[in-house]
Image: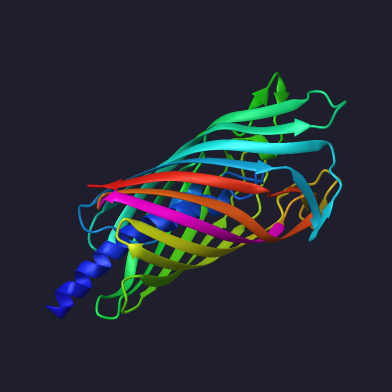
Amino acid sequence: MRLTCAAISLRFKSGFLLLWLWVWEISMLMSQCCSPGNPVGGMTIPGNNRAEMWQLLTSYRYGYSGRYFEGSQPVAPTFIRSGNYQHLAVLLAYGLTDKLTIDLESGYFLNKTQLYAPGIIPEKLSGKGFTDLTLQVRGRLLQNSLKDIEISSGAGLKIPVGSHEQKDGGLLLPQDLQPTTGSFDFVHSLFLYRGFLSDQYRVFFSTRTELRGLNPDGYRYGHLFLASGFFSWSPHYHWTFIQQLRTELRGRDTRPDTGSGIPTGSGREKVIPTGSVKFFAIPQLTFSPQPEVHLSILCDLPLYQYYHDRQLATTTAVTLSLRTEF
């Protein structure tokens, strides 16, 4: 009976964890409003489905940037007054076995917009469209029901689907406003979970690495590393509160040498301004009206930001999500 109860408890808690971590992955790669690259690959669920189990996940996210940083200090704005985006995302996950899950994910930008300072023409530029398509396989490396421990890892490929050369009013959009990177990228994720004797408290940790490829123009977005720790509290089976602390490291973009960047040799240069280090506190709330239906809301609150050069920095972002399983 002890083993059976532990297994049931783990299954119940895993349902919440899959939702939280999926929402977290979205927020990590969308945290900077007009940041380089495409955030959609961040939807991957680090945990695993049961065999023949499907999960359908959808989300809406709004992000806003209205201030500038250089290094770790706020500075006066340049020609971009502010930026914002709205994004819809969807993920379908299927458990091939109890230890192996396959994910397919993509999304659509309703807008990626920059507003410019008075006197600059045009006053606004905006992109929209489909983002990358990500295919990932995740495997469970360790699961101990009695000790309530799980470790899993995944790897996959991001495939460009939308346009990386979109125009607005005949003008080619800057890299920040393109809905897709236009490159094939490698993705790796790692998930570690530890529960305690009380079903009300849990801690878990997750990382994600994205190694960027070259797009057809020879542009390479900066490699990305994300790490996050979580503490969760479930006062009632319908409600869960979670506090997340997240670190985001984004390398500089590179491109063929134009003479305006930082030379790296071999005819390429680092792009100015790109690259950042950020640290966030992210409170979250999940409501589950039924065991198979989970609704979540979270808000990104930047605690520390460091940017190479002068860049439009994160102000805030809000995500709403829905997960169902069958």
Span of residues in magenta: 276-290
Q: Where in the figure is residue 85, as x and y percent of width and height?
A: 61, 37
Determine whether, in the image, residue 198 is placed left or right of residue 118: left
**Residue closest to the far front:** 235
At a point 71% along the width and 33% down the height, the residue shown is: 114
116, above or below 254, in the image: above
Figure coloring:
rainbow
Determine whether, in the image, residue 228 is placed left or right of residue 67: left
The residue lying toward the viewer, choosing from 164 and 309, is 309
Q: Where in the figure is residue 76, as x and y percent of width and height?
A: 87, 47
Q: Where in the figure is residue 104, as x and y percent of width and height?
A: 37, 45
Quarter of the view holding residue 256: top right
Quarter of the view holding residue 226: bottom right
Quadrant containing the N terminus is bottom left
149, above or below 206, in the image: below
The residue lying toward the viewer, choosing from 70 and 20, is 20
Secondary structure that dominates the magenta span? strand
**Residue closest to the far left:** 1
Q: Is residue 131 magenta?
A: no
Q: Is residue 287 magenta?
A: yes
At a point 43% along the width and 70% down the height, the residue shown is: 204
